[in-house]
Image (cartoon, rainbow, N blue to C red):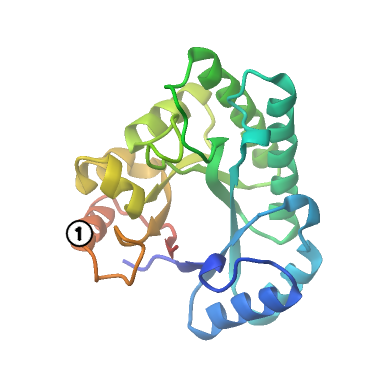
Amino acid sequence: MRNPLGIHALVWSGYWKRHDIDFAIGNSSKLGFDIIEIPLLNPYSFDAEYTKKVLESNEIKPVTSLGLSEDTDITSNNKQIRNNGKKLLSKALEMTLNIGAKYMGGVLYSALKKYDNPPTKDAINYSMDIIRDLCNQAKNVGIEIGLEPVNRYESNLLNTASQALNFIKLTECNNLFVHLDSYHMNIEESSYHKSIAQCGEKLGYFHIGENHRGYLGSGHINFKEIFSTMKEINYDGPITFE
């Protein structure tokens, strides 16, 4: 296996001002990472021009990610809130394109929060309609989109690989992929092997993290099972430490 190896920018800093950009990108490059994952905390104030300049000077490739808030939740019954989310996703895609990234992923399908109830059919359909539109925009500029299933305390819509695969199938978007994360899998999946294997060619991105978010190897995540299954399905996409 020779997958591109990445590191999340939040490992270095919780902000994205110019000194944070220099620090995060510079250190990621010095350590030999192929990729840095840049969270679009606020795509409306994101300094794409400077970010791209520093990426190019450090010869490291970017991917982007984000999560939605209550005010931008595309599963909401409130049309204005859904429109806020649609606009945010479009702006994030624009920033992704502007820095030369070819992938944008994360919790793009709902708010990143604890919900009190299961999703309604309307909520699912609202989300699918907006994600489908986002994928069509992304396809026109050569960008792939990833949906990251997260644990039940962070979303009620996509918590497992199988749910993400079903969502992707219903959208009928061929540039939409599953973005798995070992931390969330530890909570929601019954088997690392089963969840990774069923994704097959629809696995587009992988976050590695321990069950306690600490140093890799100091928890109980079965990385041997994870990596052997990746090899089994010939997964050659990014593996990023978050």
Quarter residue 50 falls in? bottom right
Residue 59: in sight, yes or no?
A: no
Q: What is the quadrant of residue 173 in the picture?
A: top right
Q: Can residue 93 be seen in this snapshot?
A: yes
Spot occupied by residue 150 in the image (x, y as percentages of width and height): 41, 42
* Furthest residue in direction top, as rendered: 121
Q: Is residue 221 left or right of residue 141?
A: left
Residue 1 lies, in percent from the top left, at 31, 66
Instruction: Identify residue for label 1.
Output: 222
Residue at the limit of the structure toward the bottom, as seen here:
30
User: How many numbered marks are there?
Assistant: 1
Q: Give x and y (percent) for residue 37.
A: 55, 62
Locate residue 26 relative to residue 18 in the image: left or right. Answer: left
Graded by Cα atoms within 10 Å as few (under 14), some (14 to 19) or many (20 or more), the crowding at tag 1 reads some
The quarter in which the C terminus is drawn is: bottom left
Report the residue at 30% width, 70% height from top: 216
Q: Nearer the viewer, residue 175 or 148?
A: 148
Whether residue 76 is situated above or below residue 153 in the rendered picture: above
Mark 1 is on which residue type? Answer: Asn
Task: Give the residue displayed 64% in from the left and 27% down from the top.
Answer: 130
Lateral position of residue 68 relative to residue 107, left or right:
right
Residue 128, placed above or below residue 66: above
- The residue that appears at 40% across and 54% down in the rendered structure is 206
Choose between 96 and 209: the one closer to the eye.
209
- Helix, strand or loop at mark 1: loop
Q: Is residue 70 above or below residue 191?
A: above
